[in-house]
């Protein structure tokens, strides 16, 4: 008899995990706080689309869902930069043929829920995890509609209930020396929609991730299948230019017209959206341990919530599931070993992508408009083209190299950055960047 498993949370990661485990013969019950999203309308202004990249795709391939998801994805081949003076520039993400994908969070989640049910996973909606009884390995759920309490037991429980995980809190409250770090950045975010053009046309280049970098803040836009774009304004909560200060329609209009030229024409109901859609915060969570013996583990954002600037939160959570599945393949029913190895492998990678994601905020909002940074990217792209195994730009390691661990990408990226800083400080680099001497210097440093 295979174990019965409880998964708390039927978000992106909990749903995918349930499919992996069901395919291995486990009997799975998933408990989700919200109603069934296949029946309800998605609430506005909450991360409508996401960038899905190679790590996430690999995890979906293993359960046979990648092709179906590619049909509802829009390839984004690079960053489309909108400068303050109204000029634009396109920066490819990687080599020719490499791209990330804009996909609807809701549609992706629904497809995962459907596949989970096809694999006999039982999903209970409107059941909110309240408390754990660790001695009995039992979880108390409260029905959010009628307030009824039920208890569910299983020999193995996963907490996949997101950044503010109730399962994690229960674990923390009953675990001596539990480590918990939570920090917010001083920027929040607000989503805005650019509606589709005539006949469902796209009013901006469809196959790009659009960025309006403005140093202390930025706005980005990702395409949706219906021709619309979902914009996200990442902006300080407080200060001279901040959400707090944009408190009248007039101020919002003036700010947008001055700061994001051309955008107000694309969002006719800007003020309505601005004051109606929520302003949300961005949190990083690092914690330890993620597991309890052979009985419990955290996964996805519940284990490692990160800021969204590398577009990796979901991809990382999907990778958790793939790695866990590989460990089951290697260790059979030995869950003590599986969970120990899962934690040993994934904790350093979760920490690494959290740090990489914070660093990428600075890159996106400040550097994508800086000519020196663009030259550096050009030198790195050329090196990668000529020596694809030796030099992989940090972005490509994270986004297009699913077999390079995040922790390895962080280490290699830092080492490459040190070399590039030396190169970029050479006098006259703007003229001689393509010379053989520069190439030799970089390769020598790389080998030393
Ligand atoms: C603005 C923004 C943009 C992002 N963009 C990207 C991107 O481009 N690419 C990317 O890879 N990632 C992105 N992310 C990150 C991504 O959204 C998360 O990493 C991903 O959703 C994590 O999935 P999860 O299943 O672990 O958690 P969640 O998606 O948060 O799902 C958790 C589930 O648990 C349920 N739940 C919560 N509490 C309870 C409870 N007490 N009992 C029962 N159920 C409960 C919730 O209702 C939810 O359904 C972005 C995040 C934000 C905020």
Image (cartoon, rainbow, N blue to C red):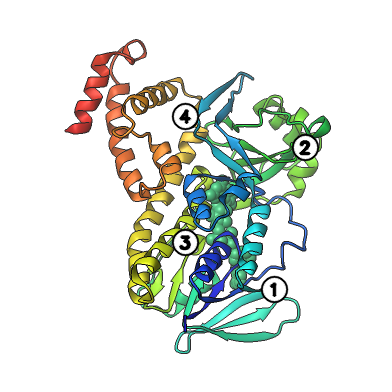
Q: Quadrant of residue 325?
A: bottom left
Report x, y in % for residue 231.
66, 39
Residue 267 circle label? none
Mark-to-mark CA distance, 4 and 3: 34 Å
Q: Disc 1 on helix, strand or loop?
A: loop
The residue that disc 4 covers is 367
Q: Position of residue 315 (x, y in %)?
A: 50, 51
Instruction: Point out the residue furthest to the left here.
Output: 448
Residue of label 1: 126
Residue behind mark 3 = 321
Q: Give the alpha-carbon distance from disc 1 to disc 3, as whole Å.
A: 24 Å
Point out the tag, 2 or 4, that comes first from the N-terminus. Answer: 2
Q: Position of residue 196 (x, y in %)?
A: 77, 35
Q: Which residue is mark 2?
A: 195
The numbered mark, 1 or 3, whose residue comes first in the sequence reads 1
Q: Which residue occupies 19% across, 27% down?
A: 444
Looking at the figure, which quarter contains the C terminus? Answer: top left
Q: Secondary structure at mark 4?
A: helix
Few, some or many residues within 10 Å of mark 2 (<14, 14–19, 20+): many
Mark 4 or mark 3, earlier in chain:
3
């Amino acid at each position: 008899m295979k174990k019965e498993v409880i998964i708390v949370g039927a978000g992106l990661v909990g749903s995918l995990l349930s499919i992996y485990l069901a395919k291995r013969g486990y009997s799975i019950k998933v408990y989700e706080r919200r109603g069934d999203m296949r029946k309800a309308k998605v609430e506005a202004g909450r991360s409508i689309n996401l960038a899905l990249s190679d790590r996430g795709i690999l995890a979906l391939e293993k359960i046979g869902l990648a092709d179906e998801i590619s049909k509802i994805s829009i390839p984004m081949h690079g960053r489309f930069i909108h400068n303050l003076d109204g000029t634009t520039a396109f920066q490819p993400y990687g080599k020719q043929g490499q791209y990330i994908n804009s996909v609807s969070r809701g549609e992706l989640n629904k497809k995962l829920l459907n596949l989970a049910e096809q694999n006999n996973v039982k999903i209970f909606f409107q059941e909110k995890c309240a408390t754990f009884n660790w001695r009995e390995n039992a979880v108390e759920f409260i029905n959010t509609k009628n307030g009824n309490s039920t208890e569910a037991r299983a020999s193995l429980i996963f907490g996949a209930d997101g950044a503010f995980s109730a399962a994690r809190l229960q674990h923390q409250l009953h675990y001596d020396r539990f480590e918990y770090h939570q920090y917010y950045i001083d920027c929040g975010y607000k989503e805005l929609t650019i509606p589709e053009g005539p006949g469902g046309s796209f009013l901006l280049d469809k196959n790009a991730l659009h960025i309006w970098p403005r140093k202390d803040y930025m706005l980005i836009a990702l395409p949706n299948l219906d021709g619309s774009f979902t914009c996200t304004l990442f902006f300080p909560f407080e200060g001279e230019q901040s959400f707090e200060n944009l408190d009248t329609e007039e101020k919002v209009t003036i700010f947008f017209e001055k700061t994001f030229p051309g955008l107000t024409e694309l969002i006719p109901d800007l003020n309505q959206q601005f004051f109606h859609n929520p302003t949300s915060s961005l949190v990083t969570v690092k914690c330890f341990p993620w597991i309890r013996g052979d009985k419990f583990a955290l996964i996805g954002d519940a284990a490692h919530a990160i800021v969204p600037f590398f577009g990796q939160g979901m991809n990382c959570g999907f990778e958790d599931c793939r790695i866990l599945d590989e460990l089951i393949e290697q260790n059979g029913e030995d869950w003590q070993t599986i969970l120990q190895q899962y934690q040993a492998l994934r904790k350093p990678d979760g920490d690494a992508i959290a740090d990489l994601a914070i660093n990428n905020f600075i890159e996106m909002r400040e550097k994508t408009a800086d000519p020196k940074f663009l030259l550096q990217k050009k030198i790195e792209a050329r090196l990668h083209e000529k020596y694809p195994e030796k030099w992989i730009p940090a972005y490509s390691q994270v986004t297009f190299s699913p077999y390079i661990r995040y922790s390895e990408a962080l280490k290699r990226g830092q080492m490459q950055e040190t070399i590039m800083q030396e190169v970029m400080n050479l006098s006259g680099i703007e003229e001689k960047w393509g010379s053989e001497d520069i190439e030799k210097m970089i390769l020598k440093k790389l080998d030393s």
